Amino acid sequence: QWIFLGGEFVKKEDAVVSVFDHGFLYGDGVFEGIRVYSGNVFRLDAHLKRLFESAQSIMLKIPYTQEEMTQLIVDTIRKNELDSAYIRVVVSRGKGNLGLDPSSCPMPNVIIIAEQLALYPKEFYEQGIKIASVPSRRNRPDVLSPQVKSLNYLNNILVKLEANQAGVQEALMLNDQGYVTEGSADNIFIVKNGVIYTPPVYLGALEGITRNAIIDVARAKGYEVKESPFTRHDVYVADEVFLTGTAVEVIAVIAVDGREISGGKPGNVTNDLLEEFRKIVTTDGVA
Ligand code: PLP
């Protein structure tokens, strides 16, 4: 396996980062998770736009243009002879001294990892998953924007740990006012009376690329989709609940805080959208 690191391709065993890298010391950097389906890098432009916007927001200058990053990602996939893969792009502040100040870091570190996919267990898709609301809350969007996909994922890690503690597969993360935002690394949708709802991102959710793709395919199929705030109660009484993300794609939720959803099995709208989503992933993107 070849990793792009420090401007060249190195073997997996040699792909190591300095202990003085501020990405390691402080979580100072940004990242993206991207999927390749049968040679198509799904919505690569959207992922790179988000990466560059995250970097711009934290005053990190990526030492390549978006076109160069596109080429480097394609090269990494080819070099590893992958047809379907998960790509992790990391841009850290790079090496500096032990102080917080990024001005001691002259060169950002760009890393591209292309890996064989570690798929979620098939039962998750066939049977759905259980989620629970957890004590940790989404950080306030006016403090650190959820649109910055930074290397500082402690907030999300805490909610994931809390979901594990609760004995369920994923967390339902609320914001400081108690509105539903998202999962630990996925967006949430509910279906009620045939209408599909997802929280507006200003409440404190990442504007997921899978989320936006699902909104597109749902509207193309004639579903009404609304971005509007909702609470845990709305989730408890929904006809269907599902999560979306690069890793999970579309996954049905069959229980929330112990309340059974859609008779304890994946609902028709969820299945319909997963099927539609799988139709576009091999064509919508960069081949
Ligand atoms: N929310 C968070 C916090 C995430 O980290 C992710 C994963 O990237 C998502 C949602 C889903 O976004 P996407 O569909 O772009 O992968």
Image: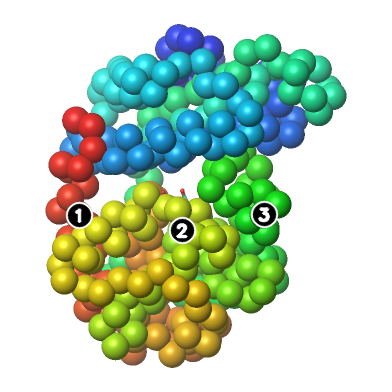
Residue at image location 43% in from the left, 90% down from the top: 237
Disc 1 marks which residue?
A: 278
CB of mark 2 near ligand 1 (< 8 Å): yes
Q: Earlier in the sequence, mark 2 or mark 3?
A: 3
The relative height of residue 20 versus residue 224 in the rendered view (above or below) is: above
Q: Residues within 10 Å of mark 2 (few under 14, many from 20)?
A: many
The relative height of residue 134 versus residue 39 in the rendered view (above or below) is: below
CB of mark 3 near ligand 1 (< 8 Å): no
x, y percent for residue 158? 67, 58
Disc 2 marks which residue?
A: 186
Q: Which mark is residue 142?
A: 3
- Mark 3 residue element: loop
- Mark 1 residue element: helix
Dots 3, 1 in contact, CB < 8 A: no
Residue located farthest toward the top when viewing the structure as drawn: 8
Q: CA distance from mark 1 to mark 2?
A: 17 Å
